[in-house]
Structures are given as structure tokens and as C-alpha cells.
Amino acid sequence: MARSRTDNLNIAVLLPCYNEAATIGPVVRGFRATLPDAAIHVYDNNSTDGTALQAMLAGAHVVRERRQGKGHVVRRMFADIDADIYIIADGDGTYAPEDAEELVRTLLTERADMVVGTRRGVHADAGRQGHALGNRLFNLLYRMIFGPDFTDIFSGYRAFSRRFVKSFPAVSGGFEIETEMSVHASRLKLPVSELELDYGRRPEGSHSKLSTFRDGAKILWMFAMLMKETRPFAFFSAISATFMLASLGFMAPVLAEYFETGLVSRMPTWVLSTALMMISFMLFTVGVILDSVARARAEQLRIHYIGLERPSAMKAPLGDAGPVSRAPPGKADAA
């Protein structure tokens, strides 16, 4: 391959896996063919079907993560592995390794910190109608709460800069990790890009680990928690408004009776409505205070992110990055 801006960059391919023995071998070999000098890391999440053996036979570095859940695996990967560019994909064969070159090229030419490979045809190939409907609803909800930065927040095919990975405080434990990544980028206003890619079907013998209702509930809970942490004023204002409406609903007939007769015959209802109104005011005040705290935390994260040095090859003038070639993985092999 021709020399390019990536000659002095270490690239790591990260593949979290759970019972993917039927597909992990071809996936690893595909990434080795596309990125021959990249370090390929497979983190086995308590598989019982020989996933780790198949990955090792295909030439990957294999590590076991005992805590169950994709979020735990990604957090361990990001902590363990040191590289300049990270590519994360699933081990089920639904993402084409050949697209990794374009993800890296886009990361460099756009000077982005994250490139998301949005899934072309995901609504048709999601496997179950519940998955397709959930994708639409959660993406719409994300854009309403956190902004229009992303159109496919659940894509598992992404490229990251080192600054993104080392400033990302992953806390989730399951499939909601992709949502957390997207919110982190939106919160710090990081440069991101999307690249539409084909989304394949699982081969015979490979099954989805995603539960429509259980994982959907976890993702919805993560939305609420991330909104509370990153947009507390909007979060607590919405709850405050709910209590205020309830208070006014109880208060209205009592006030109507008072203005008509000068008496308050339903004192318990009046006390309840007053208490609800006080709670509403308290929640609004909490939102105002926590909004200032959240802004301070975002500023600290931003300062930490800016303090992380970008590799000199990623500071080069913009232009055609050319075919993607890589230097030996170096420190990325240390994990």
C-alpha cells in the first residue's frame, strides 16, 4: 500500500464477543486482510462455545472479561489498550471488515474524534419488528433530548481517536454503552462524523443476544440517567411541571369552593395540593443548582480531553489520506 498519513499511527481493532464461535474467525481474518498491521483484540465475555479458541486460531489477541455485558467489555478494552486510532465492531459478522479503511480515512480527513458507521437497511434486517421499532423510537428520542448529532446511536461499528477513548468515562454495563458514547460526544461537542455502511445479516448458527424488552428498558433507563447527569435543568423541570399540574388539579375545586362560599371544606385536599406545589418549587430549584454543577463537570471533562495530545500524523494538513497503511502496532500489543 502507498504511504499515507497513517504510516506513523498505531491502529487497534476491538471486538467484544459473547458466543460468536461461528463468526469470529472470519471476522478476525477479514480485519487482518484489511488492516494487516493493526493489532486485533478479541475480548471474550464468558463464551461457552469456543469463541476464544477460534479468535486465537485466526490470529487475534484474546483477553477474557468475566463481568457480563458489553459495557463492561468496552470499558476494559478502553482502559487496557493504548493506540492512536481505535476501531470497534461486533464479532457476529454483520459489519464488513472491508469498511474499516473508510472509517479510518474519514476519521483523519474530517479530523473527527468519532466516526459512526450508520447501518444501511438496519430497519429491514433487525431480525424482529421490535428491534426495528425500538431503533426508530430511541433514535428519535435521542435527537429530542440530546441533539441532532447522530442518526443511528446503536451502531456498533465505530472509529475513535485516542482523545475520545481516554476521556470517555464509561459507566454502563450492557448494550446501552453505544448510547453513552454518543451522549459523551454530544455533551463535550466533539467533532464527529457518520458514514453510511451496509449492515449484513447474521449467518446460520449465530443468534442475537439483544432482548427487545429487557435491553430496551435498560436503554430507556440509561436515557433518563444521562439526561439527569448532563441536562439536569430540563430533567428536573419536567418533573417539577408534573407535580405543579397535579397540584393545580387538586387545588382548583378547593379554590372554586372558597371563592364561592368563603369556606374550605376539603382541608386534606388543600394540604395535599400545597405540598405538591412546594415539591414542584423544590425540584425546580434543584434543577437550577445541578445545572451549574453539570456545566462545571462538562468543562472539566473538556479540559481533560483537550489536554490529551493528538499524534503528529493526525495534525497534518487536510487532504486525501490515500490508501490506509499502518505502522506496527507497538504499544497496542501490550494488552
Image (cartoon, rainbow, N blue to C red):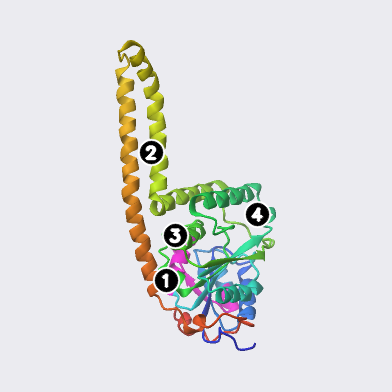
Q: Look at the image and give the residue range highlighted in magenta.
A: 55-80
**Quadrant of the frame with the N terminus:** bottom right
Residue beneath the point at 42% across and 35% down: 242
Find numbered disc 3 in the image and state the secondary structure of the residue it sits on: helix
Mark 3 and mark 1 lie on one chain; the one further toward the N terminus is: 1
As drawn, the label of residue 240 is: 2
Find numbered disc 2 in the image and state the secondary structure of the residue it sits on: helix
Q: CA distance from mark 2 to mark 4?
A: 38 Å
Q: CA distance from mark 3 to mark 4?
A: 28 Å
Give the residue number, with chain letter if any, for mark 4.
126
Please tell me which residue lies in front, 166 or 172. Answer: 166
45 falls in the magenta region? no
Viewer-side label of 2, 4: 2
Find numbered disc 1 in the image and state the secondary structure of the residue it sits on: helix
Give the residue number, with chain letter if any, for mark 3.
187
Mark 2 and mark 1 lie on one chain; the one further toward the N terminus is: 1
Residue 215 % position (x, y) = 52, 50
Give the residue number, with chain letter if any, for mark 1.
166
